[in-house]
Amino acid sequence: EAILLFLRRPEIPFDNNQAERDLRMVKVKQKVSGAFRTQAGAITFARLRSVISTLIKQKLPVLSSLTDAFRGTLVIPGT
């Protein structure tokens, strides 16, 4: 019954691969550029992807939220 629950309840995702989808962009970046040049660059990329993923999950506009964050404005969901 629980396996096909997504058919009756659309808010339940078809799969449980959110973590894999979050990591996919890192692998694409590595394929395109070959590797990260520095560990600091890899850490910065991972942090930025984490923030973008969180914004998407919170259904917030990515570009304007990032712009606000870089300007020092606090981004609060629901406001």
Image (spheres, rainbow, N blue to C red):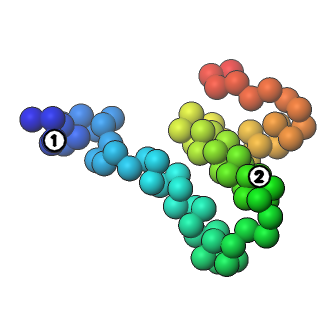
What is the quadrant of residue 28 in the picture? bottom right
Circle 2 is placed at which residue position?
44
* 44 or 18: nearer the viewer: 44
Q: Residue 74 in the image: state x and y as whole percent.
A: 80, 26
Image position of 1 with respect to 16: above or below: above
Residue 48 seen in render: yes
Q: Residue 78 in the image: state x and y as whole percent.
A: 62, 22
Name the front one of labels 1 and 2: 2
Q: Residue at x 77, y 43 (%)?
A: 66
- Amino acid type, residue under disc 1 in the picture: Ile
Please report whichever mark, 1 or 2, sits nearer to the chain's N-terminal start.
1
Image position of 38 with respect to 55: above or below: below
* Total numbered labels placed on residues in the image: 2
Quadrant (top left/top right/bottom left/bottom right) for the C terminus? top right
What is the quadrant of residue 5 in the picture? top left
Q: Residue 9 in the image: state x and y as whole percent.
A: 24, 34
Quadrant (top left/top right/bottom left/bottom right) for the N terminus? top left
Q: Residue at x 64, y 45 (%)?
A: 50
Circle 1 is placed at which residue position?
3
